[in-house]
Image (tube, rainbow, N blue to C red):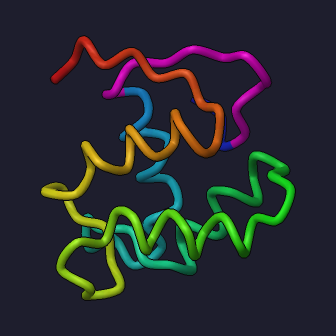
Amino acid sequence: MRSQIPPNYEMSVDEFKAWLSKFDADGDGSISRDELRQALRSLHTWFGWWKTRQVMKDVDTNNNGRIDNKELEKLVNSAQQHLNMKINESGW
């Protein structure tokens, strides 16, 4: 899968995870605020810095500044609601 997702592209949860993992620069298995910002930039999202802040606020429930596997379901929901991404949740 490419780093950039074309508009109206529908993906599975596994494809979403694979796409997001391309932005895990330090390879620790979680996504930092900066890594999430890079992912949103690849989507050419308007106000990406603001959306990054909002998504982190909604998703990072333990407030450690990273989105880990435990918070991934919330990230999928947030991406669908706030970023208009189409993610097929049948993979849960």
Q: Position of residue 68 (x, y in %)?
A: 23, 64
Residue at 47%, 49% (x, y): give it.
Answer: 20
Nearest the eye: 23 or 12: 12
Residue at 65%, 43% (x, y): give it.
Answer: 3
Region rendered in magenta: 4-14
Nearest the eye: 76 or 14: 76
Q: Quadrant of residue 37?
A: bottom right
Q: Position of residue 72 (x, y in %)?
A: 27, 50
Q: Position of residue 81 (x, y in %)?
A: 53, 37
Q: Please give left or right for residue 62 compared with residue 87 in the image.
A: left
Nearest the eye: 49 or 69: 49
Point out the image quarter for the C terminus.
top left
Q: Please give left or right for residue 27 compared with residue 3 in the image.
A: left
Q: Residue furthest bottom?
A: 64
On whether residue 12 falls in the magenta region, the answer is yes
Q: Please give left or right for residue 40 compared with residue 69 in the image.
A: right
Q: Position of residue 32 (x, y in %)?
A: 43, 77
Residue at 76%, 46% (x, y): give it.
Answer: 43
Is 35 drawn above or below residue 80 in the view shown?
Answer: below
Is 85 drawn above or below residue 25 in the view shown?
Answer: above
Is 67 drawn above or below residue 13 in the view shown?
Answer: below
Q: Quadrant of residue 46?
A: bottom right
On whether residue 51 falls in the magenta region, the answer is no
